[in-house]
Image (tube, rainbow, N blue to C red):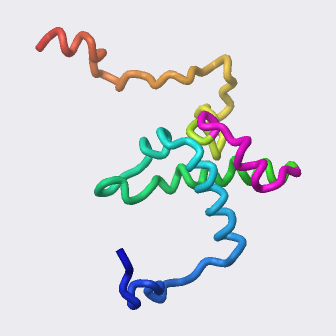
Amino acid sequence: MKLPDDLKHPSGGEQIDELAHSAIRLAHDAIERFPDMKRRHMFLAGGAAISSALVVAAGVAVARRILAGAKPDEAVQSVTEDEIEGLRLVERTPYRPNGATPADTTDEVPDPVGEPPIDSAAAGS
């Protein structure tokens, strides 16, 4: 199907610079290597769009390799599916009240005060 001439050109929105365009293209190239993962992260009608978080994670994984000295194509080929899906962009640190040490606290979320545990509440219904 041939596109009409008026649809061949962008609508006039802001264009991204060449460096950003290249980085996004490399991220998409990395994602294309894993079709099952890509399918899991597609949304909108019929999978018309891919999760931007996945594109960012893939871009970070590729950029880390390029900054370490890899060529762009090598960087794309060495990224793994687990790395893209499991990449934490910000390290998670558990909340600790002022002055508390890891030995004093736990990462478990306490039950709300005055509320019975979920199991016993369900048993009473």
Q: Please give left or right for residue 22 compared with residue 106 in the image.
A: right
Q: Please give left or right for residue 124 compared with residue 34 in the image.
A: left
Q: Residue at x 62, y 54 (%)?
A: 29
Nearer to the camera, 5 or 24: 5
Q: Quadrant of the C terminus?
A: top left
Where residue 72 sits, quadrant-wise, is bottom right
Q: Residue at x 56, y 39 (%)?
A: 85
Q: Residue furthest front?
A: 1
Nearer to the camera, 6 or 110: 6
Nearer to the camera, 3 or 36: 3
Which contiguous range is marked in magenta?
69-83
Q: Residue furthest right?
A: 69
**Magenta span contains residue 90:** no
Secondary structure, magenta segment, majority class: helix
Q: Residue at x 55, y 41 (%)?
A: 34
Image location of residue 15, percent across then percent down: 57, 82
Where residue 115 sits, quadrant-wise, is top left
Q: Residue at x 66, y 27 (%)?
A: 100
Where residue 24 sits, quadrant-wise, is bottom right
Image location of residue 3, percent across then percent down: 38, 81
Image location of residue 122, percent across then percent down: 19, 14
